[in-house]
Image: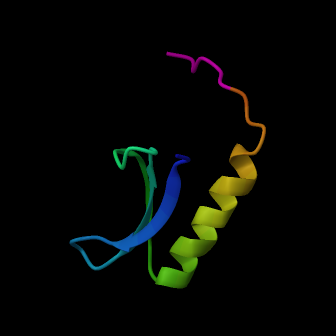
Amino acid sequence: MAGTLEAHEDKACRFRLRLKAGNGEIVAVGEAYDTPASAKEGCAAVQRAADGATVVEADS
């Protein structure tokens, strides 16, 4: 099963996006947004940016 991107409300009543693996495990959480709509836009931006993205080693 493919992973999912979700927009959800956090404990501080802000909206975040999170990436879940196919098994339901949360593997990444994004920044906080003020509205659910802006969090959903963030999810769409991640989808666009990740399409064909390469994995690189970050500088220390």
- For image coordinates 59% across by 63% down, the residue present is 43
11 in magenta: no
Q: Which of 37 and 4 is in front in this view?
A: 4
Residue 47 horizontal/vertical position (percent):
68, 55
Which residue lies most toward the left here? 11
Residue 10 horizontal/vertical position (percent):
28, 70
On the rendered structure, is 43 left or right of 22? right
Q: How is the image coloured?
A: rainbow
**Quadrant of res 50:** top right
- For image coordinates 60% across by 17% down, the residue present is 57
Which residue lies most toward the right here? 52
On the rendered structure, is 1 left or right of 13? right
Residue 48 horizontal/vertical position (percent):
74, 55
Q: Is residue 59 above or below residue 23?
A: above
Q: Which of 34 and 21 is in front in this view?
A: 21
Q: How many labels does the image show?
A: 0
Q: Give the magenta range.
A: 55-60
- For image coordinates 64% across by 55% down, the residue present is 46
Q: Nearer the viewer, residue 51 or 58?
A: 51
Which residue lies most toward the front here? 1
Q: In this view, does 19 lie above or below 15?
A: above
Residue 58 horizontal/vertical position (percent):
57, 21
Main SS of the magenta segment? loop
- For image coordinates 63% across by 72% down, the residue present is 41
